[in-house]
Image (cartoon, rainbow, N blue to C red):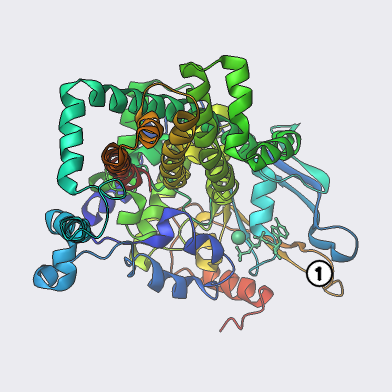
């Protein structure tokens, strides 16, 4: 009796919809049910498939290496085109020049500052935005009253293009950290808000009813049944929000800042330092990818734990 | 699994069951007074139950039989306060049910376990609010053992079979130690052997800690084995377009456990099957 895989018993999907079926006689049902079912979640990989293509693709290191193939090719093409003299060094400096620019900025102690301040802004804005998105998403997903009262307003606010906030935020909060973190907060808020409120509306009604039947209500019901049920959705919202946070960071720093990767972009543009400009872009790509990967690890763990 | 359960019939009545079910619950009377339930309004109105009048005695085991879709689950839901009747009322211990009633515990037709919790944690959700952590823990362990799932306490619902999940759901309802126990086809997904063991277990627990049991079932034999009385839900002759109501009430003679081969039970079985529209040969 140690077999795996019983989609029905998980309380969602299959079983809930089959209430009407399968009812002919008690005996018929009997034969069906105490037997473990087939077709459960994620079929385990058999050892035999370990050598096949699917097996190689399942290996973390192999995946990482394969994923680096394309960037390596781009790098090679870049190197080749610059050494062949296809572009001027202002249009496209050689990879080596970008590395030199990085070393130069590191030695002056500026690069770490740019990276640190940008990362800090993103993380702060993301944290606040995601928290607010979670709270409002839960409120609107669970309460019809809140939905009716707040949804139109939030929908309208979402329709405002992000850059439209910038002048207002600067006017209100000056060109300090607050205005930038707030803009990022706005960017991170909506993906979380939308996914959470939608997912909460689609939580298996049977499970919620079972929870209520055993005396759970309010916050306890939320934390015991509803939130765990939407954990996968929350994480996909969080990942979207993190991407948005980086997007809004650059928007904020391009316009008004004296530090950060976005500032490095505009500043380099003004000084004709294409090498630094490219460096900033590469750094944004790398740091953005790293933060997303970290969140991806957390997501994997959470989905395994809660789904 | 079988090892644990095989002892339940003879060894548990006095020893195991009481400790699992001990608590505050005492058996409560349930009365259906002119109960009506109509879904939808206007053109789409669809009456499922009408004019259900019945008094369930405290401590009685009442089996509810009836064809699929006749409103058995609806009747239980009204009793638990999960659904409000369109007319009439359900009274428990003299007071009408309004909203979810903490005097009831339900084992739903589907297991409805939280997929992210272990069976153990799922059963613990049934514990009454008053129980301390330590009491609760040992009660959950005891109940899991009673339903033959002690070795699966740490498994998640999707890692066990449908019948095992259903037993966990039964344990969750028992954990509540309710005044009224509502069981919606609790043994529907069990194989014949486990089903008999679970029926015996229910009787043991009931003997040790009498509570009022409303048991919905499709299985006439099960009703005859377990119940003091049986009500049959169905449409009255000549009123096929109206909702279902109680068309027959049967007192089951003899004390439990009843002889499964008894002639009298065989006769009642035939007659009940006839009422259900099955040829009872
Ligand atoms: N929320 C609802 N809205 C509309 N109709 C409903 C609702 N709940 C139940 N019904 C209807 O009530 C009728 C009885 O349903 P119920 O689940 O009580 O049947 P049942 O006797 O338990 O059947 P089964 O033996 O198949 O479980 C069905 O026709 C169903 O369509
Ligand atoms: Mg039903």
Q: Position of residue A80 (x, y in %)?
A: 16, 60
Which residue lies at the image location 42% right of the left edge and 54% below the top edge?
A10
Q: Position of residue A223 (x, y in %)?
A: 48, 32
Disc 1 is placed on an element classified as loop
Looking at the rendered image, the quarter that the C terminus of chain B falls into is bottom right
Q: Position of residue A168 (x, y in %)?
A: 64, 24
Q: Is residue A6 left or right of residue B82?
A: left
Looking at the rendered image, the quarter that the N terminus of chain B falls into is bottom left
Q: Which residue is mark 1?
A: B236
Which residue lies at the image location 55% right of the left edge and 76% below the top edge?
A24
Frontmost residue, A136 versus B19: A136
A24 up-or-down from B166: above or below: below
Which residue lies at the image location 40% right of the left edge and 72% below the top edge?
A32
Which quadrant does ligand 2 occupy?
A: bottom right
Q: Is residue B18 left or right of residue B46?
A: left
Which residue lies at the image location 58% right of the left edge and 81% below the top edge?
B280
Frontmost residue, B151 versus A13: A13
């Amino acid at each position: 009796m140690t077999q795996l895989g019983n989609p029905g018993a998980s309380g969602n999907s299959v079983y809930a919809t089959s209430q009407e079926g399968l009812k002919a006689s008690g005996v018929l049902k009997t034969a069906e049910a105490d037997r473990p079912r087939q077709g459960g979640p994620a079929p385990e990989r058999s050892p035999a498939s370990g050598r096949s293509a699917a097996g190689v693709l399942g290996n973390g290191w192999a995946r990482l290496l394969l994923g680096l193939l394309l960037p390596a090719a781009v790098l090679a093409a870049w190197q080749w085109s610059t050494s062949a003299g296809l572009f001027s060094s202002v249009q496209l400096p050689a990879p080596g020049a970008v590395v030199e620019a990085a070393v130069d900025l590191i030695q002056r102690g500026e690069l770490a500052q740019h990276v640190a301040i940008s990362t800090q802004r993103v993380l702060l804005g993301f944290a606040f935005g995601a928290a607010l998105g979670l709270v409002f998403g839960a409120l609107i997903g669970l309460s019809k009253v809140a939905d009716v009262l707040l949804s139109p307003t939030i929908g309208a606010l979402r329709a405002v293009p992000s850059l439209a906030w910038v002048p207002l935020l600067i006017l209100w909060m000056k060109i300090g950290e607050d205005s930038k973190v707030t803009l990022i907060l706005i960017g991170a808020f909506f993906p979380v808000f939308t996914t959470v409120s939608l997912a909460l509306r689609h939580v298996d009604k049977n499970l919620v009813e079972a929870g209520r039947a055993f005396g759970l209500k309010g916050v306890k019901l939320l934390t015991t049944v509803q939130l765990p049920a939407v954990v996968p959705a929350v994480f996909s919202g969080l990942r979207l929000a993190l991407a948005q946070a980086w997007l809004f960071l650059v928007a904020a720093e391009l316009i008004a800042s004296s530090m950060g990767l976005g500032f490095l972009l505009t500043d380099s543009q003004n000084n004709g330092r294409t090498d630094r400009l490219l460096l900033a872009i590469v750094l944004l790509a790398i740091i953005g990818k790293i933060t997303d990967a970290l969140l991806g690890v957390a997501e994997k763990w959470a989905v395994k734990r809660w789904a | 699994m079988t090892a644990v359960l095989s002892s339940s019939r003879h060894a548990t009545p006095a020893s195991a069951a009481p400790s699992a079910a001990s608590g505050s619950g005492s058996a409560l009377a349930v009365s259906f007074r002119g109960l009506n339930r109509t879904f939808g309004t206007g053109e789409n109105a669809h009456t499922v139950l009408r004019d259900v009048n019945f008094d369930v005695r405290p401590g009685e085991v009442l089996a509810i039989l009836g064809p699929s879709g006749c409103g058995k689950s609806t009747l239980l839901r009204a009793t638990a306060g999960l659904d409000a009747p369109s007319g009439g009322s359900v009274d428990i211990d003299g007071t009408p049910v309004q909203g979810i009633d903490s005097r009831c515990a339900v084992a739903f037709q589907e297991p409805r376990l939280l997929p992210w919790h272990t069976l153990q944690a799922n059963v613990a959700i049934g514990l009454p609010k008053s129980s301390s952590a330590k009491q609760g823990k040992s009660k959950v362990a005891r109940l899991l053992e009673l339903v033959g799932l002690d070795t699966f306490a740490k498994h998640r619902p999707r890692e066990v079979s449908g019948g095992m999940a259903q037993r966990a759901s039964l344990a969750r309802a028992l954990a509540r130690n309710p005044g009224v126990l509502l069981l919606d086809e609790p043994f529907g997904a069990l194989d014949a052997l486990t089903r008999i063991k679970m029926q015996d277990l229910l009787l043991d627990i009931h003997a040790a800690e009498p509570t009022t049991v409303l048991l919905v079932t499709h299985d006439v034999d099960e009703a005859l084995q377990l119940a003091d009385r049986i009500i049959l839900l169905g449409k009255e002759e000549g009123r096929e377009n109206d909702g279902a109501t109680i068309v027959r009430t049967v007192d089951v003679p003899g004390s439990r456990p009843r002889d499964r081969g008894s002639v009298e039970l065989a006769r009642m079985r035939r007659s009940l099957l006839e009422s259900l529209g099955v040829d009872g040969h």
